[in-house]
Amino acid sequence: MTSTPVPFSDGCVKVADWLAYQAAFDIPAAVAFNLDAAVAFTEPGCRGDSQRFQPGRYNLANLTISNDSIRSVTVPKGWRVTLFEHADFSGAQAIIEADTGNLGGEIDGRTSSLIVENTLR
Ligand SMILES: [Ca+2]
């Protein structure tokens, strides 16, 4: 093999790319970290500190990453993440339904609570 496939697009691991990469290099399935949880990151491009989220409601007290720090998010296929500017699911909100390497806009770096849903269930 002359080149290494790069599993990053917008800096976020894309599920299809990751599965191909995993197969090509015989990587254990457990490494596929973003298939069974939404993951929020403190830096653009899915870098920095992170926190995994199963479906549920997460108020400020439930965040292990810092308040106002989420800047990119990976979202499993069929899931929806709603980010809120303030605690108690209030203020500006952004609905994220696909991996997003750079949130941008007024929610970027301002999330204080969030809701994660698996819309396939
Ligand atoms: Ca906030």
Image (cartoon, rainbow, N blue to C red):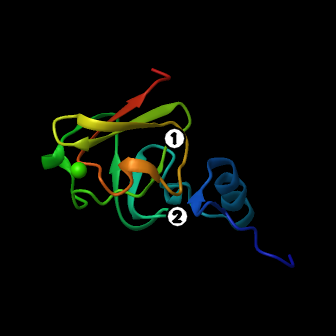
Whether ligand 1 has any atom under 8 Å from the Cβ at mark 1 is answered as: no
Q: Is residue 14 left or right of residue 6?
A: left
**Mark drawn on residue 76:** 1
Q: Could you tell me if the residues under marks 1 and 2 are in contact, i.e. CB atoms within 8 Å? A: no
Q: Which residue is mark 2?
A: 45
Residue 1 position (above or below residue 16):
below
Q: Which mark is residue 89?
A: none
Which-is-in-front pick, marks 1 and 2?
2
Alpha carbons under labels 1 and 2: distance apart: 16 Å
- Residue that sits furthest to the top in the current view: 121
Residue that appears at 64% across and 56% down: 18
Mark 1: few, some, or many residues within 10 Å (few <14, many ≥20)? some
The residue nearer to you, when weighing 29 against 47, is: 47
Query: Along the polypeptide, which appears first: circle 1 or circle 2?
Result: 2
Task: Tell me which amino acid carries mark 1.
Answer: Pro
Quarter assignment of residue 37: top left
**Secondary structure beneath label 2:** loop
Q: Pick the residue in front: 9 or 120.
A: 9
User: Residue 15: image x %, image y %?
Assistant: 62, 48
In this rendering, would 110 be left or right of 5?
Answer: left
**Amino acid type for the residue under numbered disc 2:** Gly
Secondary structure, mark 1, is loop
Front-most of residues 62 and 5: 62
Relative to 6, is 73 above or below?
Answer: above
Q: Residue at x 74, y 63 (%)?
A: 24
Residue 87 relative to residue 42: left or right? left
Q: Quadrant of the C terminus?
A: top left
Q: Is residue 24 left or right of residue 119?
A: right
Identified at 25% across, 60% down, the residue is 65
Residue 92 picture location, percent across and down:
31, 38
Q: Position of residue 68 (x, y in %)?
A: 26, 57
Closer to the camera in the image, 39 or 43: 43
